[in-house]
Image (spheres, helix red, strand yellow):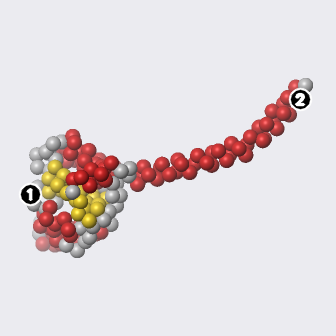
Amino acid sequence: MNRSEKKDFVKKLKEELSTSSSVIVAHYSGITVNETDQLRKEMRNNGAKFKVIKNRLTKLALAETQYKSITDLFSGPTAIAYSSDPVVPAKVTVDFAKKFKNFKIIGGSFEGEKIDQTKINFLASIPSLDETRSKIVGLLSIPAQKIVSVIQAPSRQLARLITLRSDK
């Protein structure tokens, strides 16, 4: 990478992180390229991003964001997962770490607060924004269905009464 490419990388990463709710940091040493691609694809499908990054450039990008508290985590072969949905990166990385023992989650940040493995596991256990929204829509539609059935009940009863009278 030349100097201008490095500046562009730092600028782009800073912009992406400024719209993120959480960042998960992991060491990826020992996983294959295919496994990394599988993780990237799973992240993309869930609306998150996964990047193998250069530590020095990432520290520069983090210095001007809410995630500057995690700069000490960047040593060795490091990758980050991030998203505007705070739960998705934690969910996907925890599931991936269970499948591949060489993938180690070392920490992260949630809304600017540094979090450890315990808090990341807790985040992974929470339903994502999409799951929560679908549950709310389901709960809201149940009363509407009951209202419709109550409103339609008298017309059904009237139709039955007319049918019985016409049969006599």
Report the quarter where the C terminus lies.
top right
- Look at 12% across and 72% down and name the residue there: 3
- Look at 67% across and 47% down and name the residue there: 147
In the drawing, does residue 130 fall left or right of residue 5?
right
Identify which amino acid the numbered label 1 is placed on: Gly
- Look at 32% across and 63% down and name the residue there: 21
Report the quarter where the N terminus lies.
bottom left
* Mark identifier at residue 97: none
Task: Tell me, yes or no, if residue 164 can be seen here.
Answer: yes
Alpha carbon distance from label 2 to label 1: 86 Å
The residue positioned farthest toward the bottom in the image shown: 64
In the drawing, does residue 9 fall left or right of residue 136?
left
Question: Picture quarter containing residue 73?
Answer: bottom left
The residue positioned farthest toward the top in the image shown: 168
The tag earlier along the polypeptide, 2 or 1, is: 1
Residue in front for this viewpoint, 2 or 90: 90
Task: Tell me, yes or no, if residue 41 can be seen here.
Answer: no
**Count of numbered circles in the view:** 2
**Are there few (<14), some (14-19), or many (20+) residues within 10 Å of tag 2?**
few
Q: Secondary structure at mark 2?
A: helix
Q: Secondary structure at mark 1?
A: loop
- Image coordinates of residue 57 in percent, x first then y, are 15, 67
**Are there few (<14), some (14-19), or many (20+) residues within 10 Å of tag 1?**
few
- Image coordinates of residue 92 in percent, x first then y, are 28, 48
* Mark identifier at residue 166: 2
Question: Picture quarter containing residue 5?
Answer: bottom left
The residue positioned farthest toward the left in the image shown: 76
* Mark identifier at residue 76: 1
- Image coordinates of residue 123 in percent, x first then y, are 31, 53
Please determine whether, in this image, residue 11 is positioned above or below residue 154. below
Identify which amino acid the numbered label 2 is placed on: Ser
